[in-house]
Amino acid sequence: MKKGLILCVCQGTCPSFHKMDVFEVLNKVRRDKLVNFVSLHPQLCADDGDQYLKLLLANKDIDKIYVAGCDPAMQKKMYKDAMKEAGFDPENHKGVDIRNMSTDEAFDSIRKIINE
């Protein structure tokens, strides 16, 4: 099973991401081999975020995608159309809210949802 993590950082300007080093979060996930790939996107809820998701998830080798960013319920609503257009089952997307967390707290939250 191939799985990946996208870290979405609300353009990098949202105060809710100021306590964490987003690159260290990605490095910890990568070093611990929790997923097959990691990526960073500045704003998945924007139009170019939809294009990114469609292009990425059209890869039929990807079985599961985790998105660390805002509220998981909002993610389901925002990304479902792009996922369906890519032929990716939205049920294979898991979101994790990492806003207002430190680097270690964000990593722990991501690790927990991946290991569920």
Image (cartoon, rainbow, N blue to C red):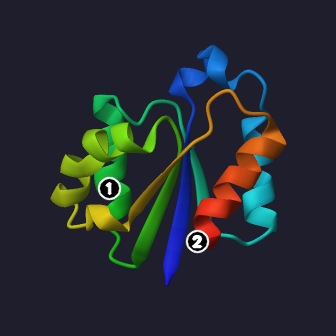
Using the image, determine if residue 21 lies above or below residue 38.
Answer: above
Q: Which circle, 1 or 2, is nearer the viewer?
A: 2
Residue beneath the point at 44% across and 70% down = 64
Q: Mark 2 belongs to which amino acid? A: Glu
Which residue corresponds to mark 2? 116
Q: Mark 1 belongs to which amino acid? A: Leu
Residue beneath the point at 77% across and 32% down = 20
Using the image, determine if residue 11 lies above or below residue 29.
Answer: above
Label 1 and label 2: CA atoms lie apart by 27 Å
- Work out whether mark 1 precedes mark 2 in sequence or the reverse, and give the earlier one: 1
The residue furthest bottom is 1
Image position, residue 35 (x, y; %): 62, 70
Residue beneath the point at 73% across and 60% down = 29
Residue beneath the point at 34% across and 62% down = 57
Tell me where residue 114 sits by quadrant.
bottom right
State whether residue 10 appears in this view: yes
Would you call the spot at circle 1 few (<14 residues within 10 Å), some (14-19), or many (20 or more)?
some
* 86 relative to 16 in the view: left or right: left
Using the image, determine if residue 28 lies above or below residue 16.
Answer: below
Near-viewer residue (53 or 109):
109
Which residue corresponds to mark 1? 55
Near-viewer residue (61 or 74):
74
Image position, residue 116 (x, y; %): 58, 71
